[in-house]
Amino acid sequence: MHFTVPDKYRAATLPELSAFVMEAKRRYGRRMIILAHHYQRLEVTEVADFIGDSYELSRVASERNDAEHIVFCGVHFMAESADILSADYQKVYLPNPLAGCPMADMADIDDVLTAWQRLVDLGLAERTLPLSYMNSAAELKAFCGRQGGLICTSSNAKAAFDYVYARADKLFFFPDENLGYNVGRRMGIPDDQIVVWNFRADDGGIDADRLRKARLILWKGHCHVHTNFKPEHVAEVRRRFPGVKVVVHPECVWDVVAAADAVGSTKFIVDYIGAQPPGSIIAVGTEINLINRMAHAHPDKRIFELSGQTCPVCANMYRTTMADLANTVENLDVFDRIVVRDEIKADARLALNRMLEVH
């Protein structure tokens, strides 16, 4: 896909770009809303109407019926979800159309359907409900809707697991293996009842007996940002900073989650940092833009990235610049929209609405 920003915006200074955006906001009023994920650049979040995690922003997109234009500063699957949940007269825009999600790409719908057919062939599908992480394509969300399943974010994953287990014996979770495993372990599901479907292997690399025994089937996917963090990083910051608090995202591996003081979604991390007293030392295991924004917002606390040796940047979140945003809001009449096909939208909306109900 080819995408360029006009020279007017590429050559502009940050104050000029901010002025373009603020003037567009004044002109459109409540007819336009700018949503920004916590991982966006600081200058983008400063002009947004709402900042949140994927759950919060999905909820806002579903409730702001007066907003004809929804500008989503995030990645592709988030803008798709906004289009699915919004009304037909509302238009959704992704300021940088190249902003995708490698984790979402790990769960290709054809691979998922192949896995599901394996469960059908073994007579297990009728006892199984699919649950997809928000970080997934619209086709996968629609599949969950058709099969009676739902979507979750890291904010409501435990509630979504409870929803499934109240209705089925088995849960098939994709695409993030670590989030699914962490929730399963904290619910007390033993390791011998958890399997990982490797979409690159025949029959997922799981024999029929193990599939029959499994209560939790995980997809072999991950977030490259959060798998940077290791248990030795936690041990090192505890050695160097006595009394440090360690808070991490549940997309981290289990050994990191188990060693941390707290674990939760991006909203949880924001609230956790805000609740710590002045003078606190807080090591954070998540994306660097959120960490930098928290350090900027709380100068009375020492807030830093957990590993101390990597730069955990979500390159796709970082794609969205102020030039992209200014270009979008000044050219809504010609800027390409994010549009989910109607035949996918209906089933995907079922799954997303279930997500909103179980939070």
Image: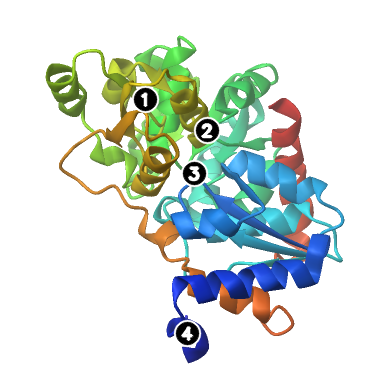
Question: Looking at the image, do the residues carrying marks 1 and 2 touch, with CB atoms under 8 Å apart?
Answer: no
Is residue 167 shown left or right of residue 327? right
Q: CA distance from mark 4 to mark 3?
A: 38 Å
- Kind of residue at badge 3: Ala
Q: CA distance from mark 4 to mark 2?
A: 33 Å
In this view, the mark in front (2 or 3)? 2
Q: What number is the disc on residue 4?
A: 4
Q: Which residue is mark 1?
A: 247
Looking at marks 3 and 1 on the same chain, the residue that comes earlier in the sequence is marked by 3
x, y (%) of residue 188?
45, 9
Element marked by disc 2: loop
- Kind of residue at badge 1: Val
Q: Which residue is mark 2?
A: 154
x, y (%) of residue 252?
34, 32
Q: CA distance from mark 2 to mark 3?
A: 24 Å
Crowding at dot 3, Cα within 10 Å, few <14 / some 14-19 / many 20+, comes out as some
Q: Residue at x 50, y 71 (%)?
A: 15
Q: Residue at x 52, y 59 (%)?
A: 44
Element marked by disc 3: helix
